Amino acid sequence: MTVKTFALPDLGEGLTESELVAWRVDVGDSVELNQIIAEVETAKALVELPSPFAGEIGRLYVDPGATVRVGAPIVDFEVADAGGVADTDAGGGGAEAPAAPAGVKREPVLVGYGPPVESGARPQRKARPSLAHHAGPASGTAVAVATVTANPTADATAAANANANADANATADAAVASLVPRPESEPGASTPAPRRSTPPVRKLANDLGVDLTTLQGTGEDGLITREDVLQASANHAGPDAEQAAPVPAGTTARETRTPIHGVRKLTAEAMVRSAFTAPHATEFLTIDVTPSVELLERLRASRAFAGRRLTMLTIVAKALCVAVGRNPAVNAHWDEQAQEIVRFGYVNLGIAAATPRGLMVPNMKDAESLDLVALAEALVELVDTAKAGRTGQDALTGGTLSITNIGVFGIDAGTPILNPGEAAILAVGAVRRTPWEHRGEVALRQVCTLSLSFDHRLVDGAEASRFLADIGTILSDPGMLLTMV
């Protein structure tokens, strides 16, 4: 038998860590190639990890709920020495793959994982003269797979597992560092070569304000490790830095500290990026939506909507899609790199959803092409899937415009923050029976406030006002929709 260690791969989203949500297997279980072995949370989505080997689970390194860095080991497999995995076709059908050359072992390559890296090997790449002064990571991160051959006369598996108890951070640094080309100074260059470090360590240094050029790495070949950065940060703070006093035994803590990770961390980063990148402006419109409420009651009683969940949000979404056609500036993106304004000819409508994992904004593709029945079904599926934690990455990317329904919490109005990359977001307040002027008299009417936040780089105040007024016109008199299409 051979023990193979599987490290957390880069799932192609540019992230440095993921949270392991649940294992689908246990130690001693037999697994097949591509069998789902775990669920990890990344970029607000749950991703299923398939097994890269066929064999038996030897060890699980990580407990559910733990945050794991890319490149850190998560599971050991015990696989057969001869044939087996090496000759297994992971393509799932199609034309027969060409035979491997003599003496060359074939390994399955899974989508999103990249080819395996042999122990101690470094990916080969052509020299790029224009990048001689840069030591960036390779364009794709491969899975680090260590191979250990068992000794039939000794318990090598136990020894391998014992050695695996070494610091996971050092393992992750070494695994990722194997993919980082070593910088070489050009002849005659007066500036020193950049310090070697991994992307997660560079991010940590940036967050802590540590200058990597001042550090001497303690890792292999001078690699700067996570511990080097933390030590430098502690030294910079000085001995007088305030230390949190421990809570005496038998007393109740007055503070509760929760690690920031997963959805909460990603949402915070996105909101900060949006708030301090796009110049926000917000407009409000309070309207009488009694005609829309009455329309909802008639539609719910109709055969077309029998058994379907039809809400005010459905009507608002349809009104928004129609208003976009008349005001395309709100359905755009500011491309900073290209210095261009990108206007979309489609509406990928995002719906902010409060889920047990935190705020998510999945979007439905081409919402403008859906009729009211299809729109109602798509909304229900989108929100239910998000609350169940099953939203895929495709639904979390590519959005062009968003709605947040704060009315379900009894809130009348707000100033929503834009979903990063989008030009506008509409907040729908609570519908309340309010004294309102109607046909020259005061009457109790169903009243709602709409709040529109927009990126003032892309949308002028006049354009935002016309867009918001069009939505208000449709909701206060649905018959006016016929004049807009």
Image (cartoon, rainbow, N blue to C red):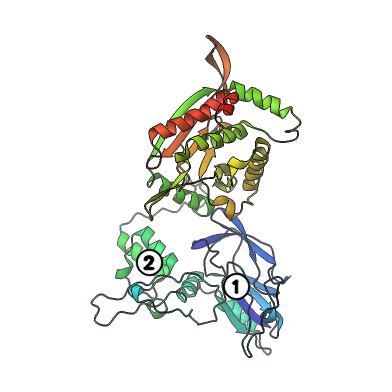
**Other residues around mark 2 within 10 Å, as few (<14) / some (14–19) / many (≥20):** many
User: How far across and how far down the image is residue 379, in percent?
Assistant: 63, 41
N-terminal label among 1 and 2:
1
Type of amino acid under label 1: Phe
Split into 4 quadrants, where in the image is the N terminus?
bottom right
Type of amino acid under label 2: Val
Q: Quadrant of residue 225?
A: bottom left
For residue 155, above or below residue 28: below
Q: Quadrant of residue 288?
A: top right
Q: Which mark is on residue 6?
A: 1
Residue lying at 42% horizontally and 66% vertically, measured from the top left:
201
Instruction: Using the image as rendered, state which of residue 247 and residue 77 is in the foreground.
Output: 77
Q: Which residue is mark 2?
A: 229
**367 sits to left or right of 256:** right
Q: Is residue 239 visible?
A: no
Q: Give the distance between the C-alpha atoms of the residues marked 1 and 2, in whole angstroms.
A: 27 Å
